[in-house]
Amino acid sequence: MSVNHPPQRVTTVYLMRHGQTAYNVDDRLRGRADLELTDTGHAQADALGRLFAGIALSRVVSSPLRRALDTARPLATVAGLNVEPDDQFNDRDYGKWTGVSRSEVIQRFGSIDAAPGVESWQTLCDRVSRAFDSLLATSHGPAVALVGHDASNRALLTTLIPALGQQPEDIPQANGCWNRLEWQPDGWALVVLNASPGDGQQP
């Protein structure tokens, strides 16, 4: 379970998903494949940078994979920061099924979770939860940005917002999206879910 109280002054976490890759277009499992962004993905990253210009971020933390790092860089640039890669926010490990069509894996095994060698959902949740605790413990506010993946984002959201845990696979996380988590007296609250630059929502 994640920490109950953030460090002093850290009250907002912007959780983002990387921009589009070729595997996203084909709906293949990305996992630990170190994929480049498509032209659309780079445009999504640049749009996030423009949207967050002027937002006071104290840190920009990212999965170590290229698609997340390249999405995080425009954010870090406008904030005058460096991107900080963190292995613990890596994508879910799909093992030998990395690069295979999602529908093919589900057809064969009934679900992604049932495919042999796939990192278990609980292991993923525990990993990103510990990383989030560490992020908060070493950060000062008021806001930090975290760029991850659909699976790692959904795992973190279900850990912080228990009401989302019933059907985590239904939590929308589009390429290039952002979510806003705010600390409130009774814990973390999800204020914005799956927003995209240009949709009218502001950080």
Image (spheres, rainbow, N blue to C red):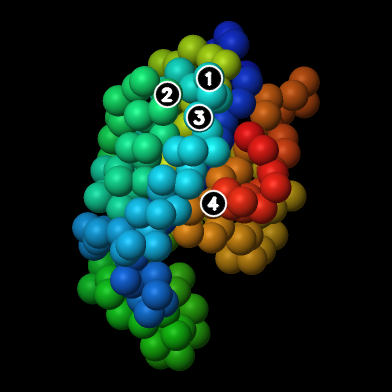
Q: Circle 2 — which element?
A: helix
Q: How far apart are marks 4 and 2 (CA)?
A: 18 Å
Is 73 situated above or below 199? above
Q: How far apart are marks 2 and 1 (CA)?
A: 7 Å
Quadrant location of the N terminus in the rendered image:
top right
The residue to which callout 1 is attached is: 56
Q: Distance between the residues labelled 4 and 1?
A: 19 Å
The residue to which callout 3 is attached is: 53
The disc labelled 1 sits on which kind of residue?
Ala
Residue 14 image position (x, y, % from top left) = 55, 35
Quadrant location of the C terminus in the rendered image:
top right
Of residues 9 and 112, the one drawn nearer to the viewer in this rendering: 9
The image quarter in which residue 13 lies: top right
Q: How far apart are marks 2 and 3 (CA)?
A: 7 Å
- Give the side of residue 12 with respect to residue 58, left or right: right
Q: Which is in the foreground here, disc 3 or disc 4?
A: 3
Q: Circle 1 — which element?
A: loop
Q: Which is in the foreground here, disc 3 or disc 1?
A: 3
The disc labelled 2 sits on which kind of residue?
Ala
The disc labelled 3 sits on which kind of residue?
Ala
- Give the side of residue 112 with respect to residue 21, left or right: right
Dot 4, crowdedness within 10 Å: few (<14), some or many (≥20)?
many
- Give the side of residue 74 with respect to residue 142, left or right: left
The residue to which callout 2 is attached is: 79
Residue for point 49% across, 78% down:
111
The image quarter in which residue 73 lies: top left
